[in-house]
Image: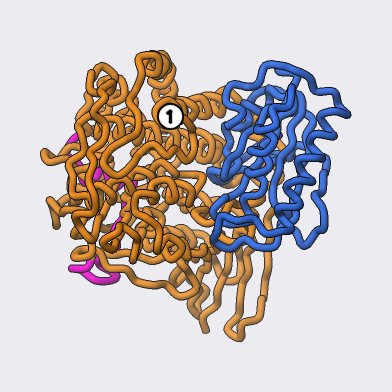
Amino acid sequence: MNDNLLVIGYGNTLRSDDGVGARVAEAVANLGLPGVGTHACTQLTPELADLVSKASAVIFVDVAAEGPVAHPILRRLEPAESSRVFSHSADPPTLLALARDVYGRAPEAWCLLVPAENIGFGEELSPIARRGLKEAVRKIRDLQRKRGFGPAAIPPFANH
Amino acid sequence: MAKRIVIDPVTRIEGHAKISIFLDDAGQVADAQFHVVEFRGFEKFCEGRPYSEMPGITARICGICPVSHLLASARAGDAIMAVAIPPAADKLRRLMNLGQILQSHALSFFNLSAPDFLLGWDTPPAERNVFGLIAAHPELARAGIRLRQFGQEIIEILGGKKIHPAWGVPGGVRSALTEEGRDRIRAWLPEAFATVATGFELFRRTLETHREEAFIFGNFPSLFMGLVAADGTWEHHGGKLRFTDSSGSVIADHIDPADYLEYIGESVQKDSYLKSPYFKALGLPGGMYRVGPLARLNVCERMGVPRADAELRLFRQQGHGAVTSSFLYHQARLIEMLAAVELIERGLEDPDLFSRDLRAEAGVNSPRGVGASEAPRGTLFHDYTVDRDGLLKKVNLIVATGQNNLAMNRTVAQIARHFVRGDQIPEPMLNRIEHGIRCYDPCLSCSTHAFGQMALEVRLIGPDGSVRREVTRE
């Protein structure tokens, strides 16, 4: 296991604000924070469970789809009861459950939901999502400092 | 008066599907529809863009099958340039496509479908969830994920990233295989063969205990379509289109994918964004055809590699002419995984994979280009029309899930007929319908990423439109 924080940002970058999670992961990667690995992707796929199980802690960064929010929301996540996946993509609790059931360990985890207002076709973020992106990166930095994640080996396919 | 049962998998924003089962006055299933409320504005979004950007853009449509879009798009670009790509580029694209087929099939079989094989469909939902099968058989799930990782590693070694590689380009590819990359791929082969063998063992046991499912899960006559090589061998990238019927007879052959519009019509289904293609000469409903692993094995004459050919012979014993049960998509998927591993092993020794001649250069020489490639779930078409500057004027994408749409409807109806009685919606029916759809391994997420696990909402709607019964399974 690596003593690291893993940031998984996901969403479709061709769907405007829907891709803000992936863009947060890219922004964090560019900072080169010690002890922080990142993975940007369109969808959460089951094999990520392997990577998740090797991290000390994981933050899943996604667009806030539940309704309008002013600022990014950081919430604790628990593994789902079942690790059964129904399609080629999974949600964070199921991915944590897969990490637990298949690889024997589900790390401490959070979801970070970033405000959004437009998920139409396009590659630009709305002003709300742009602001949310910066705040989300700040929250990740705060968590990294507060929890003392330090230099460590980054998982093999992080920082993509 | 007709009634309607609606099964609505709740997903996020767009890109979700629901199932309606129509009952007749006697409470018997008359028909079923698999609605996809996916937003198809992507084709419009691409207009005005340079065709050369399309492989990179279309690979971002979907996080599930980006490589398939990448390769079909690159082929459409080849056609616009009117070039023959270097042999090395063709071989490298094939290697990447084999990696894509392998990784997708591995997840479909070992992680999505195997739990149903082992647990059956009659177990109560609470038990299905609480006593997670994956927790009970972690080695199977791990093996499936490892096999998927092998396929993804091939993609990563070639393209530099597992998802969305901007590696395939009109005219060829950007980079060759390295010796280090070849050695990494080679090191995976023994484990990959062993995992596929485990899959065959599991499915043989499954067939012994699931004869009813093999009989009713989408078992009906239809046409089948797929690419085949010039000599009729299984093909996944390149080749010509072939249609066969359920007796195994070839009804159209040697079709240049660029001429697909002469053979394939597209009907539009009410309440669904998913177009439903059919074989034009037979119209509807006779022109319904299936694509994907089952179809590819029905249209080809051989796999072209020994172990997969031996499995193909066993597979064909289950049909009279063609194999017509969609439950056997799973077995077809295993055979394709085996063929992929064999072809990867054989291809790795080819010196062309390390060539520096990787890309043909040309401008716009044709106003239209069509690229077809076999995606894991079936034939994928990219059809571009460009202006003199290579900017896209029109884009048409035909995806595999759309081509299987009519067959999925029929599969749902066939399963439901065995279980729906009057207003009752038995839980095992939901499990079976869910699996019936899973046989096709549909990809519904080409617009945005799905959120949340599939929940099933079942509504029984009376003739006046009121909801008479509603069952939601989280």
Query: For chain A, what colour was chosen?
Result: blue
Specify the segment rendered in magenta.
B280-302
Whether residue B190 is visible here, answered yes or no, is no
Which chain wears orange?
B
Residue B322 in the image: state x and y as whole percent. 23, 48
User: Which residue is drawn at the image coordinates 79% and 46% (left, top)?
Assistant: A135
Q: How is the image coloured?
A: by chain
Q: Amino acid at mark 1?
A: Gly
Image coordinates of residue B226 in percent, x first then y, are 25, 48
On the image, which quarter does residue A15 sit in? bottom right
Residue under the image location 19 percent in, 35 percent down? B302
Q: Is residue A38 visible?
A: yes
Looking at the image, which is closer to me, B459 or B278?
A: B278
Please report the residue visible at 27 percent of the width from the left and 23 percent of the height from the top: B353
Q: Which residue is mark 1?
A: B151
Q: Residue B407, image x and y in percent?
A: 37, 59
Secondary-structure class at tag 1:
helix
The residue nearer to you, when weighing B189 against B463, is B189
In the image: residue B189, left or right of residue B249: right
Q: Is residue B104 above or below residue B187?
A: below
* Relative depth, front residue between A135 and B295: A135
Residue A137 highlighted magenta (yes or no): no
User: Given the current orientation, which residue lies at the most extreme right position?
Assistant: A146
Q: Is residue B225 left or right of residue B9?
A: left
Is A65 above or below relative to B284? above
Q: Which residue is pictured at 29% across the width and 61% down the height?
A: B386
